Image (cartoon, rainbow, N blue to C red):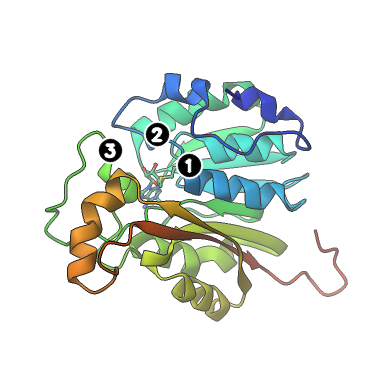
Amino acid sequence: MTSVADRDDPTTAPLFTSTTPTICDLLDHGKVYRPQHDSDLLIEAVQNSNHAVGAVAADLCTGSGVIARAIAHLGARSVVAVDASDDAVRVARALCTDSSDRVAVRHGDVATFRGRFDLVTCNPPYVPSPPDGRIREPGLPRAAWEAGVDGRAVLDVVCSTAADLLNPGGHMYVVQSEFAGIDESVAALRTAGLAADVVMERHIPFGPVLSAHAAWLESGGRLDKGRRIELLAVIRADKKPMPGGSSR
Ligand SMILES: C[S@@+](CC[C@H](N)C(=O)[O-])C[C@H]1O[C@@H](n2cnc3c(N)ncnc32)[C@H](O)[C@@H]1O
């Protein structure tokens, strides 16, 4: 079993976080999102670039802080980690203790978060959910995954504020499911003036949350009957460097 501490060397750092004992120990079960395939995929995408090295970074919707911590360990100069949940802030601060000189964890909402960064990461809530809250997942924090009927409640905010959060030459990485409209995010980021594309994709089996939503998604024609595989994508959005400026 790997430890988050093993991430210190970006060349050998393990990519998978889901079974990291340090995080499991810290997570207040049922209150803070346990890092999953989406967290891993986002870290992997940043790790495949050199965009963390020396970056002034922000991790939106930080949850346990696993992505913020990974970015710090990949060489970021500083990371602001933001989450709207008090429980997440508490856990993220504890997880990032060893990187506290570079990671500052703040309570906040992506809708009001401001600043300028070289690198922004985000694993937002993106699971489409019926408006009446009829699907319940005891043991999982609803605010960590529930994102309105189209799954875009937080994604739309993130896409529309992305350009303002990036320094010229800066990069944003967002992970999401096919069920929340990958093309819509790419289009929204392009409309905001950024060069955006999918840089990583992975098919994963449904977890407990999507399994609980399967019948509802099927009834709305958004999921083929019986399919229980989901496509996750990491979208990268780049802001143009200043003319004559360096591109990271
Ligand atoms: C899918 S979890 C991701 C957690 C972590 N980044 C990871 O990959 O393990 C989404 C997180 O977004 C937070 N969140 C939801 N809505 C938010 C908002 N409007 N502003 C900031 N954080 C939000 C939730 O509290 C939750 O911790």
Q: Mark 1–mark 2 contact, CB under 8 Å?
A: yes
Q: Name which residue type carries label 2.
A: Ala
Please give the count of numbered marks on the rendered protein: 3
Q: Which residue is mark 1?
A: 62
Q: Residue 65: where, in percent of width, then height? A: 51, 35
Q: Which residue is mark 2?
A: 88
Q: Residue 203: where, in percent of width, then height? A: 48, 57
Asked if residue 194 is positioned above or below residue 124 in the image, the reply reads below
Q: Secondary structure at mark 3?
A: loop
Callout 1: CB less than 8 Å from ligand 1: yes
Callout 2: CB less than 8 Å from ligand 1: yes
- How far is disc 3 from disc 1 in space, using C-alphas? 16 Å
Q: Of callouts 3 and 2, which one flags the residue occurring earlier in the amino acid sequence?
A: 2
Q: Which residue is mark 3?
A: 140
Q: Secondary structure at mark 2?
A: helix
Q: Residue 18: where, in percent of width, then height? A: 49, 34
